[in-house]
Amino acid sequence: MNTASAPETTGAESLLVRETLKALYGYVRPHRWTVVLGLLLALVGAAGGLLQPLATKALVDRLSSGGTLATVLLALTVLVLLSTVAEAFGAYVLERTAESVVLAARRSLIGRLLRLRLAEVDRMQPGDLMSRVTSDTTLLRAVSTQAVVNAATGALTLIAAVVVMAFLDAVLLGVALVVVAVVGAGAACVMPKIGQAAERSQAAVGEMSTGLERVFGAFRTVKASGAEERETARVEASARRAWRHGVRGAKWEALLGTADNLAVELAFLAVLAVGGARVASGDIPVSTLIAFLLYLFYLMEPVYKLVEAASAYQEGAAAISRIKEVDRLAAEPPATPQPARAQPSAAVRRPASVRFEKVSFRYGPGLPPIHRQVDFDVPGAGMTAFVGPSGAGKSTVFSLIERFYEASGGRILVDGKDIRQWPLSELRSAVGYVEQDAPVLAGTLRENLVFSAPGATDDDIRAVLARTRLDTLVERLPHGLDTLVGHRGSKLSGGERQRVAIARALLRRPRLLLLDEATSQLDAVNELALRDVIAETARETTVLVVAHRLSTVTEAERIVVMDAGTVRAIGTHEELVDRDKLYARLAATQLLIPAGHSGG
C-alpha cells in the first residue's frame, strides 16, 4: 500500500471550538469533582492574595492615625500562610488529576489503535499514530485541568479585583481598563498563531516517529546499505521542522507574555500619573492610591493565568484534533472477552468449510482489482494449495477470510455462513494464521508460542515443540522457553522464526489453518519434516496453503491455480500438469516434471 498518501492534519481540519470543548469535557468529566476541589483550593489561595492590598491599606491608615499594627500584621501573616498552603495542595490535586486524564486518554487511544481496520493502518504512518499516544496525549495534561482552573480562577479573581478597584476609585479603574483593553486587543490576534504552531509541531513530531520506526524496522538493511547518514538526515529534517514550529510557537507565547506585562506596566504609569494628581487635589487619600497600585500589580497574576490558559487551550486543541482524528478512523468492534481455557475438544474442532462465490476485491477506489470473480470450494478437512505467479492474489485470499479487508463483491462462506454474519472474535478464534514473513514479537519464546493460545498447558507446548522440531532449539537456549528472542525475533534465524510461527498456529488447534509461504526459509530437512506435520494436521483440520515451492503441495487434495486475480484452474498435481499450461510451466521450472512437458 502507498503510505505516502496518509492525510496530514491541518488547521482547516481542526475541530471547531465547541467540538474541542466537548471533547475536553469528555476527558475531564470522570474527574470533575476533583477538578472542582482543585478550583476551590485555588480560589482560597487567590482570595488570600485579593485581600492583601486591603490589609495594606488598613496598615497605612493605622500608621497615619497612630494606631497599633500588631493585629493587622498578624492577620496579614495568617492570610499569607493559608493562601500558600491552599494553593500548594490545590496544585498537587490538579497535577495528580491531570496525570489520570492523560492515562485515561492513552488507554482509550491504545484500545482504539489496536482495533483499527488493516486498511486504515496501511493508509496511515505507524510512527505518526504512535506519536498521538505519546506526545499528543501529554499536551492534555495542561489543558485538561490546570488550564481549566487557571481560566476559572483568573476570570473570577480578575472580576473580584476589578470590583474592589471600582470601590476604591472608579476614575483610576477607567484609566487602567482603557490601557489594558488596547494592549489586550493586540494580544488576542496572537492566540490562533500559537495553536497553528503547536499543531504543525505535533505533526512534525509524528513524522519524526515515523522516520525512526522506518529505520528500526529495517535496521540491518540500513547498516548493510551504509545508509545511516542519509536516514539520520531524513529524521533530523523532521526534528528541525518540529523545532522550527516549536520556536515559532514560543515566539508568539513570549509576545503574549510581554503584552501582559506591558499592559500592567503602562496601566501602572497611567494610574500613577492620574492618581498622583487626585491625591494632590485631595480627591483620594494616599492609602487608596497605594492599595489601587497593589491591585494593579495583583492583576498580573489573574491576567497571566488567563493568558496561560488560552495558550494551553491552543496547544491542547491541536492535540485533541489529532487524537480525535483517530476516532474517525474505521475500527473493528471490540472483541468479546473470553477467559483463557483448555484446548477445545475434538468434537468442537470439526474442520471448517470455505467457499468463495464470485469474490471481487480492490484495496481502494481507483486502484486496480486484486480479485476478479474468484470462485472455489473447500468442503472440509484436507490440504488445499494456492499457486500462481507473484501478484496473482493468493495471499489476499487469507486476508479476506480473516476479514482484515472486506470483499468488494461476492460472498465468502465459512461453514456455509457468510463471514460478515460471524462475530469477528468467533471467526478468528477458529482460524490459525501463519503470515508470509512469520513475525515474532519481542519477549520470550514461551510468550510467542502461547500468544494465540494463552490457555495452553506445558504438555501442549512440549508436544508442539517436538512436532515442529523446536525442542532442540529450546535445549540450546540459555533460559529455555523463557529466553528473550529480541526485537521482531532478531535472535532467531529466519527458519526458526517460521517454525515458531507454525508452532504458535498449531498450539491454537484451529479448525482452519492458513499457511502463507510457511516453509520458504526452511532447509530441506526441516521442510520435509514440516510437510509431514502439515499433512498430519490436514487429516483433522482444513488447511489452506499458499506456496511458491510446488514441492510442498504436490500431495494436496486440490490445487487452486490463480493468475491476475482470477482462478484459472483447480485440480490435483497430476491433473493440472496435463491440462493447465501455467501450472505445467511452474512445475517444469521447479523440476517436478520433465522439461519437455508443456501441459494440455
Image: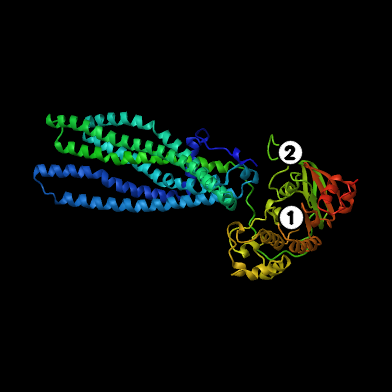
Where does the image place residue 532, in percent across and percent down from the top left?
79, 63
Residue at horizontal 30 percent and vertical 41 percent from the top: 301
482 left or right of 79?
A: right
Residue 162, by quadrant, is top left
Which class describes the residues within 10 Å of circle 2: few (<14), some (14-19), or many (20+)? some
Residue 598 can be seen in this image: yes
**Tag on residue 369?**
2
State the mark number for residue 397: none
Please say whether residue 317 is visible from this viewpoint: no
| Residue nearest the viewer, comparing 402 with 231 | 231
Quadrant, the C terminus: top right
Q: Nearer the viewer, residue 586 or 168?
A: 586
Report the front residue among 246 and 407: 246
Residue 49's spot in the image, x, y percent?
A: 26, 45
Residue 1 appears at what percent x and percent y? 65, 42
Secondary element at tag 1: strand
Q: Is residue 147 above or below residue 532?
A: above
Q: Residues within 10 Å of mark 1 (few under 14, many from 20)?
A: many
Residue type (three-letter) at the residue carrying disc 2: Pro
Circle 1 sits on which residue? Answer: 515
Q: Is residue 448 above or below residue 318?
A: below
Residue located 40% across and 48% down the image: 36
Please give left or right for residue 407 compared with residue 53 in the image: right
Classify residue 210 by image quadrant: top right
The amino acid at mark 1 is: Leu
Q: Residue at x 69, y 34 (%)?
A: 366
